[in-house]
Amino acid sequence: LAYSVGGSYGSNINYPGTFRLTTMTKSATTSEAIDAIIKEVKRLQNEPITKEELQNTKDQFLNSLVFRYDSKSQILNERISNEYNGLPKDAFDKLMEGIKTTTIQDVQRVAKKYLKPDQMQILVVGNKKEIGDQLQKYGNINELDISIPEPKSDEPVVEGDAVKGKEWLTKMSNALIKSGTKVGIIKEEGSITQKTPMGDQKIEISSSINYKEYSSDRILNTAQGEVQMSFKNGSGTMSMMGQERPLPPQMVKPIINEMKRHYLSVALHKNDVKADYLGDETVDGNSYAVVRAKYDGVTITYLMDQKTGLPARSRYSEMNPQTGQMQQAVSIYSNWTTADGVTYAYTVKTMVDDELAAEISIKSHSVE
């Protein structure tokens, strides 16, 4: 049972047992969001939900499973967790079936049995100054520091040649963007095939991306229906079946980092990039120039074609929020195509910890 209210800061209401109700709101309206949840809990216990509410909740949950597993390591971790907790091998299938067969009566029965407003515990994460004294009415307050530092990368620290690094970065930028081309919004049509426990999931995607401002609008055609995602100014929303909700924090950071690490973003921000040439590296019999790019909080290493300057591969390390461990991601670019003065990789394979996680196939792109 879960309800969410749009915004940028979160508070959770945890009940003894297995239920956690989460809301996302601005710090200034924290108490209003908590009161709204309590009101909804009581409504769940006293009034049956509608068929539409139940179906929308089922569709949202089932659709979210598409994005839950994007690598074999995550699938393996899920199976290890199930094994550790004594769950059967078909636990995932039973979960899917259980969601599909849940009834209105089930929801009200569970709400009455497990949700106990008089025993609730409240966890608020937000801006202390903006929250102020809103929480006083809920009783004693315990303050906790829940910041989690990211583990250090296993990659060795290597000093590079900054002069050659800038030269290679300029060569890559010139190869990607024709001289005199003004790059605003990149429109692309294509698809992404992700690896999941249910097999390959192919999603058709239509995107409008501004790599200079880190904003995007995307339409994803999934098996469960059309999903619209919008991202701007460090936050975003997801819409499906007429319902809109904010993107959770664990999705926001990967989205913005993905845009920052894109080769076009690096090219457009080249004046702010610290580039270091790390030498040459041979992969599959081909020699590439290795350039590490650092800017705006991200670090990514490119393997550039010695002749064209186009990136053949990129790699970076990032913490997996599900495991708390650093993971190594490698993108392999091919099928380069030029349109409106911008050269784009129409095929991108992404490997995570040496396992194929996803493959992007672009059909067309244009520049506005």
Image: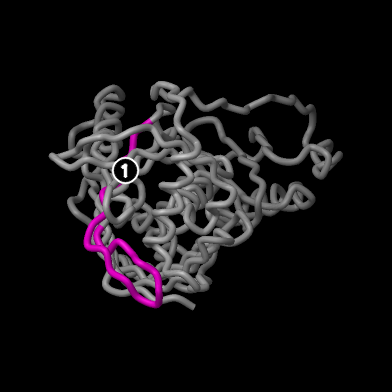
Q: Is residue 329 highlighted in magenta? A: yes
* Residue 247 falls inside the magenta stretch: no
* Start-end of magenta stretch: 327-347
Q: Is residue 206 above or below residue 138?
A: below
Between 294 and 81, the one nearer to me in the picture: 294
Q: What main secondary structure does the magenta stretch of the protein show? A: strand
Residue 187 against residue 312 in the figure, above or below? below
Residue situated in front as seen by the camera: 291 or 55? 291
| Amino acid tagged 1 | Leu
Residue name at image x 45 percent, y 53 percent: 170
**Pick the front one: 143 or 136:** 143
Q: Residue at x 28, y 30 (%)?
A: 82
Q: Is residue 48 left or right of residue 168?
A: right
| Mark 1 secondary-structure assignment | strand
Left or right, 111 with reference to 203: right
Q: Is residue 122 above or below residue 227?
A: above
At horizontal 71% and vertical 40% (from top left) the residue drawn is 126
Where is residue 20? Give x, y as percent: 53, 40
Residue 278 against residue 5 in the figure, above or below: above
The answer to whether 237 appears left or right of 328 in the picture is right
Please rate how many residues cluster around mark 1, counting C-alpha atoms within 10 Å: few if below 14, some from 14 to 19, many from 20: many
Q: How many marks?
A: 1
Point 42% across, 69% down: residue: 178
Residue at the right extreme of this rendering = 133
- Which residue is tagged 1? 303
